[in-house]
């Protein structure tokens, strides 16, 4: 039975097209892995399928209805989502976190009933966390915490589970444990699983079918044997690999080949650690370009849900995130300064500055005073983006006096290529 159907779906962050003409069908009971390099559109595809993002073109069907026409509450009773990052600042007990998954099923007064607690207990038991139910979420290991977030989604009693990089930052033992849990849920409970993964071999071993994205387009859809071919990997990831069958599973296994010898006449760009001050989508295109050049990027501070925040997640970039619709706090600014001081250079993108994010510019000035190179994109026109009553313009003038350079994106790329 068909669960999802995507028809000619495209989506853009600002002017940057991230998904292009996607046609895809997911059947009830499938276990699908979405693969592709950073910036290929994997996380965005998952969010479009969940209804969190609305396509700019095309339609997404959940069953026989367009997903965005289903109310958020009803969607939450059908789709369980495990995001790439989960923020739980308050020290909730694990049982309380899992019980949050029952919210879409609660009545007018929002009171947990006996039946709701049965679902919570079942989710804890399924994920092997019953004995930890009264422990603070902050006291759990990385693997336990991730299982707790999955348990929260399971408590919704969904028909499909969407997971964005569910084993990122976990060691091998916990990676295997999470995938074994998902396989059990799929095979024994009939739960449809759709997950984003960077690990080609894990996806090959566990997923029933794979979707390979390349710059927002479908490169291949099918079994691991059909998708993970040397030709597809070379086109999408720009690396040469050998593909072998791994016994006893007889699933394709990817082995990297040593890179060819460098041509002595060609000059290889030295990767740099770069911190970008962004916001409102101002850093998305720059981040994508610098990431493609091989530089190690960080970004922030920005609000969760901001276009640049989502773009950083799509590219796998370290990002300092503040809660939505909230001024950047001192704590987040301190973390931002720490990233700036670790970086080789700081780039301030064409961000509009208001009272909520002016602290980012102050941190850039502080980094400059401590000896960091700072570049400001279109810095000469900072007044056009100053909504602070002139404070941002004054900060830019002070930065300019202390050596900050105003450049445009092509000039910055050329500077990085030349290794200045």
Image: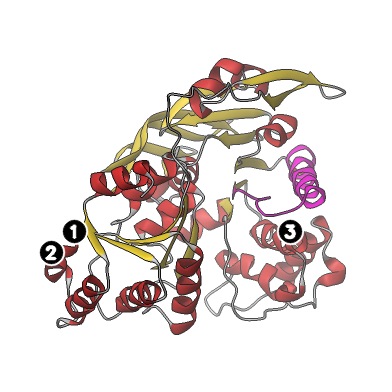
Q: Quadrant of residue 367?
A: bottom left
* Residue at x 80%, y 40% (from the top left corner): 188
* Residue at x 15%, y 83% (from the top left corner): 389
Which of the two discs, 3 and 1, sits closer to the camera? 1
Q: Which of marks 3 and 1 is nearer the N terminus?
A: 3
* Residue at x 27%, y 66% (from the top left corner): 404
**Badge 1 vs badge 2, beta-carbon distance below 8 Å:** yes
Residue 336 visible in the displayed image: yes
Q: Main secondary structure of the magenta part?
A: helix
Labelled disc at residue 174: none
Q: Earlier in the sequence, mark 2 or mark 3?
A: 3
Labelled disc at residue 147: 3
Q: Is residue 178 above or below residue 342?
A: above
**SS for tag 1?**
loop
Q: How crowded is mark 1: few (under 14 residues within 10 Å), some or many (20 or more)?
A: some
Q: Where is residue 31 in the image (x, y as percent from the top left)?
A: 66, 35
| Region in magenta | 164-188
Q: Is residue 176 magenta?
A: yes
Side (left or right) of 215 relative to 126: left
> How far apart, in angstroms, are the residues tagged by discs 3 and 1?
45 Å
> How far apart, in angstroms, are the residues tagged by discs 2 and 3?
49 Å
Q: Does the magenta stretch include residue 178?
A: yes
* Residue that carries the numbered disc 1 in the rendered image: 378
Side (left or right) of 411 relative to 98: left
Question: Which is nearer the eye, 336 or 117?
Answer: 336
Question: Which is nearer the eye, 114 or 85?
Answer: 85
Identify the coloring.
secondary structure
Labelled disc at residue 381: 2
Residue 50 visible in the displayed image: no
Q: In which quarter of the image is residue 388?
A: bottom left
**Badge 2 vs badge 3, beta-carbon distance below 8 Å:** no
């Amino acid at each position: 039975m068909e669960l999802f159907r995507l028809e000619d779906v495209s989506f853009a962050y600002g002017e940057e097209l991230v998904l292009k003409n996607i046609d895809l069908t997911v059947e009830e009971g499938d276990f699908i892995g979405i693969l592709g390099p950073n910036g290929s559109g994997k996380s965005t595809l998952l969010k479009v399928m969940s209804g969190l993002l609305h396509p700019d073109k095309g339609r997404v069907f959940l069953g026989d209805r367009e997903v965005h026409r289903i109310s958020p509450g009803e969607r939450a009773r059908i789709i369980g989502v495990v995001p790439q990052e989960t923020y739980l600042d308050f020290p909730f007990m694990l049982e309380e976190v899992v019980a949050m998954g029952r919210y879409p099923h609660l009545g007018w007064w929002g009171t947990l009933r006996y039946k709701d607690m049965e679902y919570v207990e079942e989710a804890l038991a399924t994920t092997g966390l019953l004995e930890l139910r009264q422990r603070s979420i902050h006291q759990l290991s990385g693997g336990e915490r991730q299982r707790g977030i999955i348990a929260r989604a399971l408590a919704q009693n969904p028909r499909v589970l969407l997971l964005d990089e569910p084993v990122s930052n976990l060691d091998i033992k916990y990676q295997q444990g999470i995938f074994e849990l998902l396989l059990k849920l799929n095979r024994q409970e009939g739960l449809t699983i759709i997950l984003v993964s960077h690990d080609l071999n894990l996806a090959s071993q566990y997923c029933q079918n794979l979707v390979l994205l390349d710059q927002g387009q479908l490169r291949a859809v099918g079994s691991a044997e059909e998708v993970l071919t040397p030709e597809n990997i070379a086109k999408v990831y720009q690396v040469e690999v050998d593909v072998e069958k791994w016994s006893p599973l007889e699933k394709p296994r990817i082995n990297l080949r040593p890179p060819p010898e460098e041509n002595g006449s060609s000059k290889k760009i030295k990767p740099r650690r770069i911190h970008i001050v962004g916001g409102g989508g101002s850093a998305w295109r720059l981040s994508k370009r610098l990431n493609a050049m091989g530089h190690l990027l960080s970004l922030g501070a920005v609000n969760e849900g901001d276009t640049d925040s989502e773009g950083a997640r799509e590219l796998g970039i370290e990002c300092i995130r503040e809660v939505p619709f909230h001024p950047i706090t001192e704590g987040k600014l301190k973390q931002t300064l720490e990233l700036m001081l670790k970086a080789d250079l700081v780039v301030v993108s064409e961000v509009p500055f208001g009272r909520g994010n002016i602290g980012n510019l102050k941190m850039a000035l502080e980094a400059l005073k401590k000896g960091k190179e700072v570049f400001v994109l279109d810095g000469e026109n900072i007044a056009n983006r100053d909504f602070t009553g002139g404070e941002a313009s004054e900060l830019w003038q002070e930065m300019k006096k202390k050596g900050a350079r105003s450049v445009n994106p092509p000039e910055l790329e050329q500077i990085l290529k030349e290794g200045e």
